[in-house]
Image (spheres, rainbow, N blue to C red):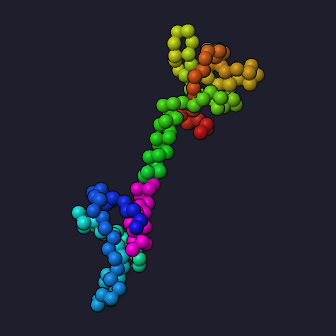
Amino acid sequence: MTEMELCAFFGSENVVPIEPVADYPVENLFKYAYVHCDDCHADGPPDLGTSGAIERYNTRPAEDKLRAEIAALQSRLSNLENGRPMETAPRDGTCILVETKDMFGKYFEIISWNAVANLWVSIVGDCNDYLLRWWPLPGSRVK
């Protein structure tokens, strides 16, 4: 049998498929299979077959959308925490934030690539320090 998700309301594991009763005397009553939580008594959407009812019960568009958004945010957060390798930095004059290191320690600086001089430059001049990693600036066109 297909594995079922926990109850959407309480997270209960006491979720069971209810088989349709084909020969029930009242028309359309119990004709459909559905999934039922024995703890909170919530029912999933009905379907003509048990496997379809389980599949419909396990399909949760709102939760799936939230999970996708959470994964995207976690990925963005990971990029913010870890930065990007300098080899991937744009060399088109776009300003970026970098973590750099010199004999005094690590610090952050905004730099851009100067194609004429063929080097990274900052507001105060060329940037010959050891560049560790970079991040796009908020609102920049860099993705």
**114 sits left or right of 76 in the view:** right
Is residue 64 covered in magenta? yes
**135 sits left or right of 64 in the view:** right
Counting every numbered tag in the picture gives 0
Vertical placement of residue 76 versus 2, above or below: above
* Dominant secondary-structure state across the stretch colored magenta: helix
**126 sits left or right of 139 in the view:** right
Q: Quadrant of residue 58?
A: bottom left
Residue at 67% across, 21% down: 120
Q: Judge by depth and name the residue closer to the eye, 87 or 134.
A: 87
Q: Is residue 109 visible?
A: no
Whole-percent x, y for residue 126 in the image: 66, 15
Residue at 61% across, 37% down: 142
Q: Quadrant of residue 23?
A: bottom left
Is residue 63 covered in magenta? yes
Magenta-drawn segment? 50-65
Considering every residue shown, the one lying at the far left of the view is 39
